[in-house]
Image (cartoon, rainbow, N blue to C red):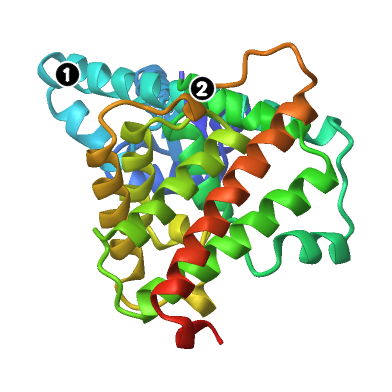
Amino acid sequence: MSYSVGQVSAFAGVTVRTLHHYDKAGLLSPSGRSRAGYRLYDEADLVRLQQILFYRELGFPLDEIAEIFKDPQANALDHLRARQEQLTAEIARLRRLSEVAQRAIEVRRTGVELTPQERFEVFGEITADLSYATEAALKWADSPGQREAMARAGAHTKEDWRQLMGEATAWRAELLAAFDEGEPSEGERVMDLAEEHRLHISRWFTACPPAMHRRIADDFAADPRAFALVVPPARQRPGLAAYLCKAVHANAARRTDARPTDARPTDARPTDARRTDAHRADAHRADARRTDARRADPAEHR
């Protein structure tokens, strides 16, 4: 029994144009023609169409399907195994994306909403590249630190964000000053700035031991989107990301053991009280460094 192109199109769920395309590509040429020259498909043609649609559903391109059809016994199994591996990897990627979306939903549900004006006041020139944020979330999806950082970020209030971004702005100004003044990246002043950055991450997001801090700094040096999270592009200098990366590595090298401040507080006082003490301690250290610098060169700070 033979079927016209219209009939095949109707019960196979493909367009007439698709059937014509398969014919031109040499994948499915009808076995017969009517007296008027119209395409006619027999049972064997329909079986072949089913195979084509099966491979297309699995995502095979037409040229690869044609390769399989050249020798189905020899080629099909290898191609299917390769495709199965690709699909398994894609399923895992989509699951991770789903988890990222779920965490984003949880953050939105915390109720910390910022107006455009408040967002500018809090974050200033710092913006997150969505593609980098997604890649980073996928890269560290299985990391307890990533999960904790997301949870703590979602729990921050507007005042928390103002405070932590204020700290980041002051730190960035000191980093740029050190770089512009030619301070060596492995000098005490810049290593102390690297240490401040590490403690800032631990204080506001997740415990950041030196090894983890090195990985973060490597991302800064390798990906401009990552570095833009700490220094906006308009304020960057050539070589600044590598400069900070070297300082972080040097600071990690001098710290073979993490300080007690790396760990999350374990006392029973409210979180806000513990956080205030940590801020005061860090502020005292920063003031001491600035005082020492002024004593070393009073004219520079007039």
Q: Is residue 221 above or below residue 211?
A: below
Q: Quadrant of residue 220?
A: bottom left
Q: Classify the position of the C terminus by image quarter.
A: bottom right
- The residue positioned 39% from the left and 30% from the top of the image is 209
Q: Position of residue 232 (x, y in %)?
A: 54, 69
The mark closer to the camera, 1 or 2, is 2
Mark 1 nearby-residue class (10 Å; few <14, some 14–19, many ≥20): few
- Numbered disc 2: secondary structure: loop
The numbered disc on residue 263 is 2
Q: Is residue 195 above or below residue 171?
A: above
Q: Nearer the viewer, residue 89 or 34?
A: 89
The residue wearing badge 1 is: 78
Q: Quadrant of residue 276?
A: top right
Q: Nearer the viewer, residue 226 or 239?
A: 239
Q: Amino acid at mark 2?
A: Ala
- The residue positioned 68% from the left and 55% from the top of the image is 165
Q: Nearer the viewer, residue 106 or 17?
A: 106
Can see residue 190?
yes
Quote the CA–CA distance across marks 1 and 2: 51 Å
Q: Quadrant of residue 112?
A: top right
- Numbered disc 1: secondary structure: helix
Q: Position of residue 35 (x, y in %)?
A: 44, 43
- The residue positioned 25% from the left and 56% from the top of the image is 246
Instruction: Please indicate whether residue 281 sits to the left or right of residue 220 in the image.
Output: right
Mark 2 nearby-residue class (10 Å; few <14, some 14–19, many ≥20): some
- The residue positioned 45% from the left and 65% from the top of the image is 292
Can see residue 31?
no
First in sequence: mark 1 vs mark 2: 1
